[in-house]
Amino acid sequence: MCSDSSAPDAHQTIAVSGTVGESPASAADPQKIRLEKRRGAVVLLSGGIDSATTLAIAIAEGYDCHALTVAYGQRHAVEIERARSVALFFGAPHQTISVDLASFGGSALTTDENVPHHGAHEIGGNIPATYVPARNTVLLSLALARAETLEARHLFIGANVLDYSGYPDCRPEFLKAFEDVANLGTKAGVDGGLPFRVHAPLLQSTKAEIILRGAELGVPFQLTHSCYDPTPNGLACGLCDACILRRKGFHEAGVEDPTPYAG
Ligand SMILES: [Zn+2]
């Protein structure tokens, strides 16, 4: 389980649950503190299946996880609350930061443009209307800034190339290039010591594989949200790309989908 090894400051929206259970003696152990710094991680948590499973993997691998959710003006803002619930479930410190990407427009996720509703066979190929300009660059930059303040060196993102092959900022070459940016553009990176690493453990997984992995690790799927176009009361539409891929993934994994769909 994750522990909160940092002192939250007054301006952060941080929700911490669970008990750390650490004695003062062990907390003061320099070797333990060094180890915790080496294992410190910032996990981008959107509230969807992929990022929730990524958090579960990071925890299972022994990282000291700090979850970060970005409110970027997405129309499916219900996912921000879901992210908070997932972080609470895992006992991970959680922070939400607001960055108004909607003021730039350019995406069906941040404007009044219709979110496409079509069949899974049509997904992929072209960059979809739900692409948010430079979103993962912005998200990873914020995760990097948070990591540097925490003296953490690991960034986790639930990027995936298979189901969303149209998103250029989910490709492995992009993630590797961002790792280089992290090490070239930060004080922590040029001061020496451990380099930053970008982890995308689900990069090559299908949605069904992600769901199976999540099920093994106890991910609370009932708390996650995938829909790009939820109803006013927060129900998943059942028809957008994200809903179609979620339903298909649960079906292929043979795992029950706890989502109530509107359509
Ligand atoms: Zn939907």
Image (spheres, helix red, strand yellow):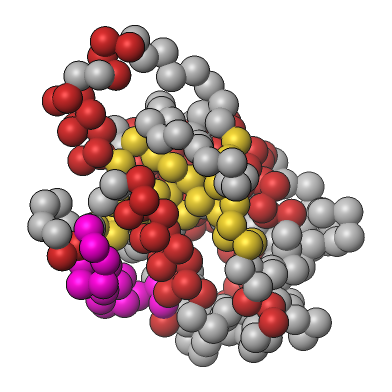
What main secondary structure does the magenta stretch of the protein show? helix
Q: Is residue 152 visible?
A: yes
Vertical placement of residue 151 versus 7, above or below: below
Q: Residue furthest left?
A: 192
Q: Is residue 220 visible?
A: no
- The quadrant where residue 222 appears: top right
In this rendered view, identify the residue nearer to me: 93 or 215. Answer: 93
Q: Position of residue 14 (x, y in %)?
A: 58, 40
The answer to if 50 sits in the magenta stretch is: no
Q: Position of residue 221 (x, y in %)?
A: 60, 41
Give the residue at x 50% y 51%: 68
Which residues, given as a range, are shown in magenta? 169-188
Q: Is residue 152 left or right of residue 108?
A: left
Q: Is residue 243 left or right of residue 214?
A: right
Q: Position of residue 100 (x, y in %)?
A: 65, 73
Q: Is residue 4 left or right of residue 60?
A: right
Q: Position of residue 104 (x, y in %)?
A: 65, 86
**The N terminus sits in image quarter:** top left
The answer to if 171 sits in the magenta stretch is: yes
Q: Residue furthest right?
A: 232
